[in-house]
Image: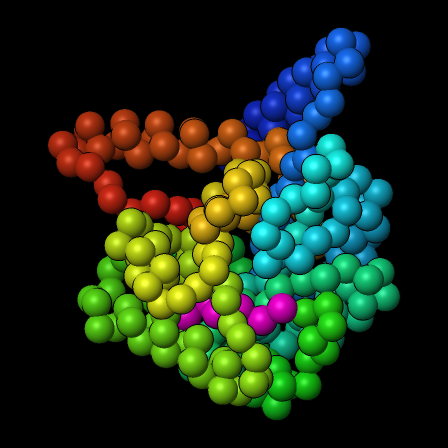
Amino acid sequence: MLKRIIWLFGSLLVGAFDWFRAGIGRLFGQQQSSTCVVLAYHSVLPSERANFARQMDDLLRHAKPVRADLKKLPEDNARYAAVTFDDGLENIIENALPELNRKKIPATLFIVTDVLGTRPAWEYFGGDDPSQHRVMSEQQLRGLPSDYLIIGSHSATHPVLPDTDDDHLGEELVGSRRKLEAMLNRQVSLFSFPYGYFNKRVVESCREAGYDRVFTALPVLAFTQSDEFVTGRVGVTPNDWPLEFRLKILGAYRWLPFAFSLKRKALAVLRGRSDATLGLKAS
């Protein structure tokens, strides 16, 4: 809770700075560039559906929804947001997709291919225990609408990718993609890192595997370059405080990677080594 409050306070300062800078820019006739954030959900329980619906209403009030496979932001000085879900949990079908369909908000589901129809058994680092939820079945995945839903890979077994050897890494990246494409008879071009962990070797392996874009758990602004391959996301839950969620949509949590980098460097100095693994702990 304390960490959450500290993050909120820091993001309030960033949001206030953005508001002040935008005001000064308007005063001098300067136009603001378009911005986008990608939201990363995992689970939406029945008790959280109303909260999720309110968040989507808030998103529509403060941003324009876009697909996560967008190549380039429109140059209209607007604020955009993309919605994604990791793990492919069954409760997303039941509680999130009806709200997205009703509000005409596109979304991306990142699927762990080898656990379809089961309960996840992968390790988790705090937060909600994924083993308490069921992953959607292959039949359910096949039956999802394709008009507003994009399917991406979240690996085959949800490992910590930087810790896997090259052969295993290839199966997690290429194998999972091929399974999804054969299952759905459509191209799969997006990938999100399990736990948010990645390093340079993993990123290059994703390029070689043929993905068009990969997604992290670092809450930086998205689609800032036309050839962007590595895209950040901000983690959200249906139980985020309204102000917390609003600041995430506004991109005010983008200061966190800088803080994490400073922390890693400080720890590396204390331990006398460098840390080559990047990312955030996420399920």
Q: Residue at x 20, y 37 (%)?
A: 274
Question: In this figure, which colouring scheme has been used for the structure?
Answer: rainbow
Q: Is residue 205 above or below residue 247?
A: below
Q: Is residue 203 above or below residue 156?
A: above
Magenta part of the chain: 150-155
Q: Position of residue 193 (x, y in %)?
A: 42, 59
Q: Position of residue 194 (x, y in %)?
A: 42, 61
In depth, the one of 64 and 60 nearer the eye is 64
In depth, the one of 150 and 73 nearer the eye is 73
In depth, the one of 246 and 178 nearer the eye is 178
- As drawn, which residue projects farthest toward the left? 272
Residue 87 is at least partly visible in this image:
no
- The image shows a total of numbered marks equal to 0
Q: Is residue 176 above or below residue 11?
A: below
Question: Can you say which quadrant of the picture contains the N terminus?
Answer: top right
- Residue 143 colored in magenta in the image: no
Quadrant for residue 43, please give it: bottom right
Q: Residue at x 36, y 67 (%)?
A: 209
The overriding secondary structure of the stretch rendered in magenta is strand
Q: Residue at x 45, y 51 (%)?
A: 229
* Horizontal side, residue 167 vs residue 159: left or right: left
Q: Residue at x 40, y 66 (%)?
A: 210
* Horizontal side, residue 205 vs residue 252: left or right: left
* Horizontal side, residue 116 vs residue 280: left or right: right
Q: Position of residue 93 (x, y in %)?
A: 70, 75
- Residue 152 colored in magenta in the image: yes
Residue 81 is at least partly visible in this image:
yes
Q: Position of residue 253 (x, y in %)?
A: 58, 34
